[in-house]
Amino acid sequence: MSDGSIPLSQPDITEADIALVVETLRSGRLSIGPMVERFERMVARRAGCQHAVAVNSGTSGLHAVLLAMGIGPGDEVITTPFSFIASANCILMAGARPVFVDIEPQSLNMDPKLIEAAITPRTRAILAVETFGSPAHMSTYAEIAAKHQIPMIEDCCEALGTTERGKPCGSFGTAGVFGFYPNKQITTGEGGMIVTDDERLAQLCRSLRNQGRGESMRADQGSWLRHERLGYNYRLDELSAALGVGQMQRLDSIIERRQAVASAYIDRLLGMDQLTLPTIEPETNPSWFVFVIRLVTGWTREERDTIVQQLRDHDVGAADYFPCIHLQPHYRTAFGHAEGDFPVAESVSERTLALPFSTNLSDRDIDVVTQTLSLMLQRQDLRRG
Ligand SMILES: *Cc1c(COP(=O)(O)O)cnc(C)c1O
């Protein structure tokens, strides 16, 4: 960037994307139109699913899926404590209770060995998250869900374009939800997409996103003001969908570029023995949501926080992805969670560190980031004696 700072993330927007948005703006059709349908078809195809329902955020998509499955008060949903807050908040929004399962320290996804012990007669779903975009264990979660005859919901907001055992993410559960916030693989500004093979579920989600109207209702039909259930305004607008169409057309080249940036980082960081680098699990194809490294065991949260701050002081974007969800003030108060509840997630979360990551990063940017980081680590090493 012109001011010399290297941001944590940046969207990849081309002149063709902009032209498509402007063309849509000129068309006069700003909501419920052809762009949303086109965007839905593109994402459905990529996820290997029959149906796609565009929504105005990943969070609204997750909320709609839980409601469409009839999940509500008194129900439990199994999920991970190491994620962005939305993957657990959607369970609270539906009135149900999140039951956290600790993570496995390599992939940073839920430990498959711990899931069955968390299942109770009240368990209504497993909500799995591809943390940092890693699809590791998705097939195993789906097998466990099937064995217990409960649906699996895939929060694949960080994982567009990834595969596990050759299967595209979005297709592992009964439903999957993508997010298109500006730091994701592709963006619509704000936006999300529900994908599923279950036609009834897709219909219900279409109704829930559109004020509870019957699924076949159109604005030009007399039944437009008939509301069959409590619904929401979770619609994605045409301008956002147009941006999504432009982005989806370039998804493969975007992922290729993200892979190249990740490889460039890994080449430069391999020698630093204070760091654990991201692992690519067997039989997975990542699409690189973020580039998160971890200080090795023995380093403290304070040391990590110091390094994040020092990187920022040197105009290098850095962040502590993710603080554990169960230790967020709201979850401590509502569910009595405390330190020690999920020791692996807590130990990992104290030592993770996200570096600047986008398709726009040059080799020179990556040099600046890794050299600055190296200096901070050496300085911290000296301090530790
Ligand atoms: C981005 C994200 C979401 C959705 O976020 P929105 O801002 O609502 O689109 C949900 N879950 C995870 C894990 C995410 O990273």
Image (cartoon, helix red, strand yellow):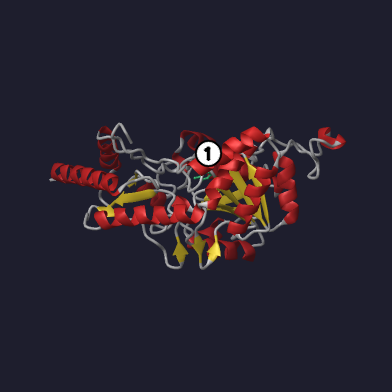
Quarter of the image with the N terminus in it: top left
Residue identifier under label 1 = 18
Residue at 53%, 38% in the rendered image: 18
Drawn side of residue 47 relative to residue 293, left or right: right
* Foreground pick, 51 / 73: 51
Where's residue 116, x and y in %?
A: 55, 61
- Taking the spot 55% from the left edge, 46% from the top edge, the residue there is 246
Q: Compared to 143, does 195 lie above or below?
A: above
| Camera-nearest residue between 188 and 346 | 188
- Compared with residue 127, is residue 379 higher up or lower down, i.e. above or below? above
The mark tally for this picture is 1
Q: Is residue 169 visible?
A: yes
Q: Is residue 156 visible?
A: no
Side (left or right) of 280 relative to 65: left
Relative to 25, residue 363 above or below: below
The answer to whether the beta carbon of the residue marked 1 is less than 8 Å from any atom of ligand 1 is no
Q: Position of residue 346 (x, y in %)?
A: 39, 47
Q: Residues within 10 Å of mark 1 (few under 14, many from 20)?
A: some
- Image-based side of 283 in relation to 364, left or right: right
Q: Secondary structure at mark 1?
A: helix
- Location of residue 308 (image quadrant): top left
Residue 93 placement (x, y as % from top left)? 62, 38
The residue depicted at 65 percent of the width and 49 percent of the height is 38
Residue nearest the viewer, comparing 199 with 37 = 37
